[in-house]
Every structure is written in structure tokens, then in C-alpha cells.
Image: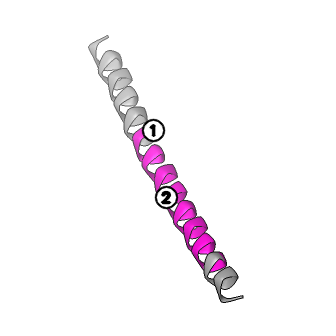
């Protein structure tokens, strides 16, 4: 019975780590998307100012 309990704890820990990594990945992707969006907006502003 202890073996099953330890295995469940291990699996739970792995699942929690996976969720944390997924949340971190989503955060990094959102930051990249925001950076690209700002860069694109800046290009539009520069083109508008040239005309």
C-alpha cells in the first residue's frame, strides 16, 4: 500500500510540475506576442509619420 501511495505522490508532483511549466510557457508566449505586436505597431507609426 505504501508503494501505491508513493507512486501517487510522485505522479501528482509530476502533474503539478507539468501544469507550472505549461503556465510559464503560456506567459512567455504572451510576452513574445506582445513584443511582436508592439514592434508591428511601431512600424505602422513610423510609416504613417513618413507620409
Seen at 43% across and 34% down, the residue is: 37
Q: Nearer the viewer, mark 1 or mark 2?
A: 2
Which span is picked out in magenta?
8-32
Q: Secondary structure at mark 1?
A: helix
Where on the picture, by quarter, is residue 49? top left
Residue 5 lies, in percent from the top left, at 67, 84
Residue 14 vs 38, above or below: the answer is below
- Residue neighbourhood size for the residue with mark 2, other residues' Cα within 10 Å, grouped as few (<14), some (14–19), many (≥20): few
Q: Nearer the viewer, residue 1 or 5?
A: 1
* Residue depicted at 38% across the width and 22% down the height: 44
Q: Is residue 33 above or below residue 20?
A: above
- For marks 1 and 2, the one nearer the N-term is 2
Q: Is residue 12 one of those drawn in magenta?
A: yes
Which element is circle 2 on?
helix
Residue on which disc 1 sits: 33
Who is closer to the viewer here, 20 or 27? 20
Residue 11 sits above or below residue 45 on the image: below
The residue singled out by tag 2 in the image is 21
Residue at mark 1 to residue at mark 2: CA–CA distance:
18 Å
Q: Main secondary structure of the magenta part?
A: helix
Q: Residue at x 33, y 23 (%)?
A: 43
Spot occupied by residue 19 in the image (x, y as percentages of width and height): 57, 62
Left-right relation of 4 to 19: right
Amino acid at each position: 500500500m505504501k508503494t501505491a501511495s508513493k507512486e501517487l505522490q510522485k505522479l501528482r508532483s509530476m502533474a503539478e510540475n507539468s501544469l507550472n511549466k505549461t503556465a510559464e510557457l503560456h506567459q512567455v508566449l504572451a510576452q513574445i506576442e506582445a513584443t511582436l505586436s508592439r514592434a508591428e505597431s511601431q512600424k505602422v507609426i513610423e510609416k504613417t509619420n513618413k507620409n
